[in-house]
Amino acid sequence: MEITIDTRPFADIDSDALVTYVFEQEKPADGLLAQLDQANGGTLTRLAATGELTGKWLESTLLYYPQGLAAQRLLILGAGKRDKFTSVELRRIAGTAVRSLKSRQGRRLVFLARENDRSEAAAQAIAEGMILANFDSEKYKTDKKPGSEITNVAMIGWEESARAEAERGITRGRIIAESQNFARDLGNEPSNKLTPSILADRAAAMAREAGLAVEIFDEKKIADLKMGALLSVSQGSAEPPRMIILTYTPESVNQNAPVLGLVGKAITFDSGGISLKQSKGMEDMKYDMCGGAAMLGAMRAIAALKPKCKVIAVIPSSENMPGGRAQKPGDVQISMAGKTIEVANTDAEGRMVLADGIAYARQLGCTHLIDAATLTGAVVVALSYVNSAVFGTDQSFTDQLLASAKAAGEKMWPLPLDDEYRDMMKSSIADIKNTGNGKGGGASVGAMFLREFTGSTPWIHLDIAGTAWQDDTKPWNAKGATGVAVRTLVDLAMKFGANSSKL
Ligand code: BES
Ligand code: ZN
Ligand code: ZN
């Protein structure tokens, strides 16, 4: 999708649709909206008077062959209350514009940004919303209609003098949204099309294209490094595991500067192992690699946006299957860090692979760690499908992440880490057990297990089990993998780089 800034008079721009948005209780009295109304012979004023154009959130008013405009259609979306309108709503309006036109086989869209939405940040949000909306989860359908994608967008409303700023916003928005779509595409892949080796190949191809250093460890190397927790999960599967390591190094960086480590759970299918899951909903467990996909998406954007800090992604990938060699409940495994783990439940496999991922990221010299994982069903009990859970050992680092989540428009909410949750994982035979004591708090117990492997390194854990997947299509985006956390992580890496280069 090509997105350009067009400063020609809007009435002259030929397109399949001109789209704009109005707020509740707004009259098309001035600015471009008034001009649009005039060009169109006062239709907007008349529609508002008859109560058909109210500005209610996502109300959709579509006019065909609008008078006075070169566009074939005029679409006016309701933007809701003006004082509630933030970049989150703007992204969704832009996305809804794209999906409404897409469903009508249109290809060329003109988007009129309103008076307050002509900043660089607004241009970024619009571009993000449109690129995210243009993505579909129908990769394997063979009867896709041709032309079901928007190919050209002209953004209007900007003065010629603001063009450079708007174009910067568009470029940045494109990088971030395409990277989020990269993560979504991986999340949607069925597990027969995305095994750990295929995921590693795709990560390596992306890294080469983006200019990142890449290392892929096969099963032998993983064994040589004594990553016993990761190996224990993969041993029940016919598919070998992989450890994926991507490194972004800025052009100049001081030796003692902080290094950001991104560790992502990438279980390409989680059957539960011998502690087998029920079959209802098991097909969803192809998305148990969305933590890893989020890190890959973030690295793709980081490579292009070039923060001033080193960033290393460590992604342990495996299937979790109940094969004849599978680990069994009660088995004891020795993790890379040397800590022994009693596997009370083979379905708590994410924390196993992350234990070795975290240990390895520390060994590589990461000074700050963030992991993302579809770790627990319990997080859905706590926060539903609305918020990702945030756990952190360093308040200021955690606050930075929460601020980035807000800036990126991703809902994240802190949950506690207390020593009591650690006590729930006491094992009578090993250092720790991989489950709690059945008395609830599953998301915090899972997080506390990971904490055992982080030592003194400031660390944040994101449990995205409730937010990585969307069952239903929204007006502004397709159902399926959401690519959650990519935007937050990119925002954080950019700010982290800016702050650490001042140290
Ligand atoms: N991958 C699942 C968690 C999950 C559940 C992700 C629902 C997405 C949607 C994870 O590996 C798991 O099975 N966790 C167990 C842990 C338990 C055995 C301690 C769970 O949440 O039941
Ligand atoms: Zn599991
Ligand atoms: Zn899992």
Image (spheres, rainbow, N blue to C red):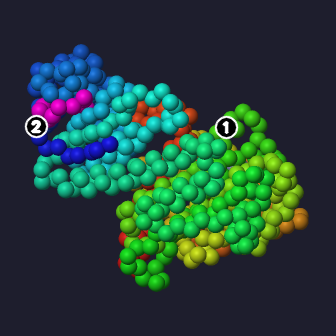
Name the kind of residue labelled 2 in the image.
Answer: Pro
Point 42% across, 82% down: residue: 254
Point 45% across, 29% down: residue: 144
Mark nearest the camera among 2 and 1 is 1
Residue stretch in magenta: 10-19
Confirm whether the magenta stretch covers residue 156: no
Total marks in image: 2
The answer to whether 52 is drawn above or below residue 299 in the figure is above
**Label 2: few (<14), some (14–19) or many (≥20) C-alpha neighbours in 10 Å:** few
Closer to the camera in the image, 44 or 417: 44
The quadrant the C terminus occupies is: bottom left
The residue labelled by disc 2 is: 9
Point 48% across, 27% down: residue: 143
Name the kind of residue labelled 1 in the image.
Answer: Glu
Q: Secondary structure at mark 1?
A: helix
Name the spot of residue 328 as percent of width and height, x first. Answer: 85, 54
Q: In the rendered view, does 159 fall on the left or right side of 352?
A: left
Name the spot of residue 24 as percent of width and height, x first. Answer: 29, 30
The residue labelled by disc 1 is: 283
* Outermost top residue: 50
**Label 1: few (<14), some (14–19) or many (≥20) C-alpha neighbours in 10 Å:** few
Name the spot of residue 291 as percent of width and height, x first. Answer: 58, 54
Q: In the rendered view, does 79 fall on the left or right side of 420?
A: left
How far apart marks 2 and 1 lie (CA) works out to 51 Å
